[in-house]
Structures are given as C-alpha cells and as structure tokens.
Amino acid sequence: MLVLLCAAPAASATTVYAAASLRAVYPRIDGRATFSFAGSNQLQLQIERGAPADVFASASPKEAQALYREGRCTRPITFATNRLVVIVPAANRAKVRSVADLRRGGLRVAIGTAGVPIGGYTRQVLRRLRLLDDLARNRVSQEPDVSSITSKVALGSADMGFVYFTDARASRDRTDPIALPARAQARVEYQTCIVRRRGGDGDGAKAFIRRVLSDRGRRLLRAAGFGVPRR
C-alpha cells in the first residue's frame, strides 16, 4: 500500500505595516513577523486599497486614527514618542552648524513630503522657528519617508536633512546630529492598531502588539532612542 505523507502547511507570518523610522527596532522586537516599512501615509493608502496588513504602526496619530474612523482597524494605541533633529554628512563640507543656516541659502536640504509625518513635523518646527519661508532660499529635495532623507544625507547628496532622533542615532557612523530648540519641537507620537480585514491574522496581530507593549519591547524601543509613554 502506498502511503502519502503530507506535511502540515506552515503558519503564515503576521504582516506588519510600519513607519520607516521603526525599521531598525521592530524586527528586534519580533523577528518572526513579515514587515513592510514606508511612509505612514503610503501605508495607510495601501491598507485602504486592501493590502494584506495585520498590524499598522504610524509615526503620527493622523494615519492610524483615519483608519479607525473608517472601520479598518481597532482603536489605536500610542506606544512610542520621538523628536526631530537636523543631520549633516560626517564630512559636513557645507559647514552647517545650526538650523538657522537655512537663512544663508544655497544649501541642499532634504525634507519629507508634506503628506508624510516627518514632512508635517518638519514644517511645524520650521514654522515655529520662523524659518519655513527660508526653505525657498535653498535647493529642497522632498522625500517619501525618513529613511530616504537619512540615506541622502549619509551619501552626501544633501547638506542637511530633518529626521527623527532615532534615525540620526542609527546613522551616527555616517552623519552628525544638530539639535533643534526645545521650544520648537513637534509632539511626535506613534500609534498602532490591528487591521480589520477578511482572512487577517487577528490573533497574531494581538500577540505582536503585546510584544511591543511588553517590558522587553519597551526596553528595545528605549535602547533605539524612542520615548515610551507611561502605563
């Protein structure tokens, strides 16, 4: 008699759509998940169009809250905070010392597009510093996410860029940070939720978010430079 042995199908990994600034820390929190990192606004749009995400983590409340209002995800939870800094290439040939150097003009400046959280936060900071109009004095490159800004500065294709503190920390072997005045800082909050979709991995999504909120997850977030809210 011929006996056919069939292996049980492997369980599919939980799919996490997360802001680009979480690229370094999220796989450390749970290396079993499948990740898609990009600008939060891009990921929101993909989920609205039916992308197979189980978890969504955005770099601002705006995107997660929009999906919640649409009935596409559970009530979002704030799990981390961040702040903005300016980064310059390690060589710093343009001799940028302060964000106020925008006033002298002629610099190559990398910022996020207006629709992505890093772009919105950057414009908020510059508006508070009364430097937003000075962008026009410079050659501005608008990027789709914070990873693109960091890469551009690290490669020397931009003289300065506006990124999160965590991205500056992750690229410190290739870039140098310049602090921004505390009075101008934006309130950067990350929110996460479980995506509601037919065939989604709800249990896996819950387990992933529990890992993020666990003591270990909070330690890893802090080690990467994020702030974590009080419980």
Image (cartoon, helix red, strand yellow):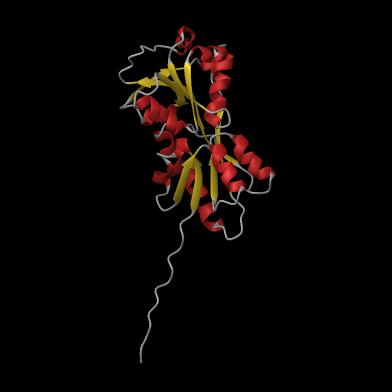
Residue in the image at 57% along x and 37% along y? 41
The N terminus - image quarter: bottom left
Q: Position of residue 209 (x, y in %)?
A: 52, 48
From the viewer's perspective, is residue 46 above or below residue 107? below
Q: Quadrant of residue 56?
A: top right
Left or right: 188 as drawn, with respect to 69 = left
**Depth check, front residue: 44 or 143:** 143
Give the x, y percent position of residue 49. 61, 49
Locate residue 31, reporting x and y percent.
39, 50
Q: Is residue 166 visible?
A: no
Residue 143, relative to residue 97: is it above or below? below
Is 28 placed above or below 5 here?
above
In this picture, residue 45 sits left or right of residue 112: right
Query: Looking at the image, which is closer to me, 33 or 46?
Result: 46
Residue shown at 44%/69% (left/top)?
9
Quarter of the image for residue 25 reads top left
